Every structure is written in structure tokens, then in C-alpha cells.
Image (cartoon, rainbow, N blue to C red):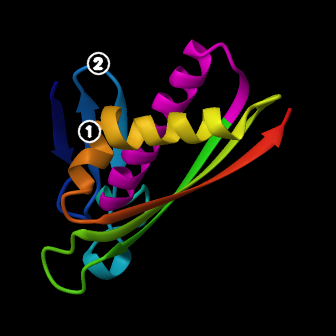
Amino acid sequence: MECTIDWGGPDGMLFVATTGSGHVTAMDGAPEGGGHNLAPRPMEMMLAGAGGCAAYDVVLILKRGRHVVSGCQVRVAGERAATDPKVFEKLHFSFVVTGKDLLESAVERAVSLSHDKYCSATAMLGKTAVITKSIEIREA
């Protein structure tokens, strides 16, 4: 797996990443850091990646268990250290899973399996951050 990141030039802090799978995404900095606020910050992308990894796992686990899942939203809130390197020290994953007759135990199991076994992103971030999670189930 690889990515190539190209700087947009001397007038800012815009970076464009091209992934090994051929997709493109942009990252930028805040104006006070020389950016133009044109795209997410790199650390926001880390949160998005961790949330996407966890959501992917939860949906896949529920589908494989033949549960009728029609939606999965994850909100990831992070707190960073005050000094450099400003690693994440706390992360909270709030899951909202929508489906038909979803059992709370099945959703909790899927979230736990993602966190404890499958999600590479949360496994890495968990080296510096305390990770907590909450679950809400909505009927479709």
C-alpha cells in the first residue's frame, strides 16, 4: 500500500495525495499555519480514516451475520496533546447504526470486534490514545 503526496506550491499549504488504488484527495492547513482552508487538515484525515475503518468493519460484520443494516454513521471526536508531536490522547467513536430489528448485542459485538480485532487504524491510534465508544441503534 502506498500514497504519493504532492505540495501545491509556494503560495500555501495545499497537498494532494494520490493513493495506490488511484484515488485523489486534498489536505490543507489553517490560514494561521500558512494554508488557505481549502481541504481537511491531515490530522482530520486520520480521524476520518479511523472512523471509516471502524464503520466498514461494523457494517461488514453485521451483514455477514445476516442482520438487516441500512445505515452506519460514526462521529469521531479527538483530543490532542498540548505539545509536539500533538498526538491524539483521547478518541471517542459514536456509532449510530440503522437497520431492521437490530439486536443491541449484535451491534455491540460488531463494534467490539472492530475495535479489538480488525480495525488497523484504531489499533495504531490506540498506542497513544484512550479510545472510548458509544452506540445508538435506530429502527429503519
Residue visible at 17% across and 62% down? 10
Three-letter amino acid code at the position of disc 1: Ala
Range of residues picked out in magenta: 43-71
Asked if residue 72 lies left or right of residue 25, the reply is: right
Residue visible at 26% across and 74% down? 34
The quadrant holding residue 17 is: top left
Quarter of the figure that contains the C terminus: top right
Query: Quick check: 79 above or below 109?
Result: below
The quadrant holding residue 39 is: bottom left
Q: Main secondary structure of the magenta part?
A: helix
Circle 2 packing at 10 Å, graded few (<14), some (14-19), many (20+), is few
Identify residue for label 2: 21
Identify residue for label 1: 17
Q: Is residue 64 a member of the stretch shown in magenta?
A: yes
65 and 4: which one is in front?
Answer: 65
33 and 90: which one is in front?
Answer: 90
Residue 18 place in picture, x, y as percent: 26, 31
The quadrant holding residue 108 is: top right
Q: From where the camera sits, is residue 120 visible? A: yes
Considering every residue shown, the one lying at the far right of the view is 140
Three-letter amino acid code at the position of disc 2: Ser
Residue visible at 35% across and 46% down? 26
Residue 37 place in picture, x, y as percent: 42, 65
Query: Quick check: 102 above or below 20?
Result: below
Quarter of the figure that contains the N terminus: top left
Give the secondary structure at mark 1: strand
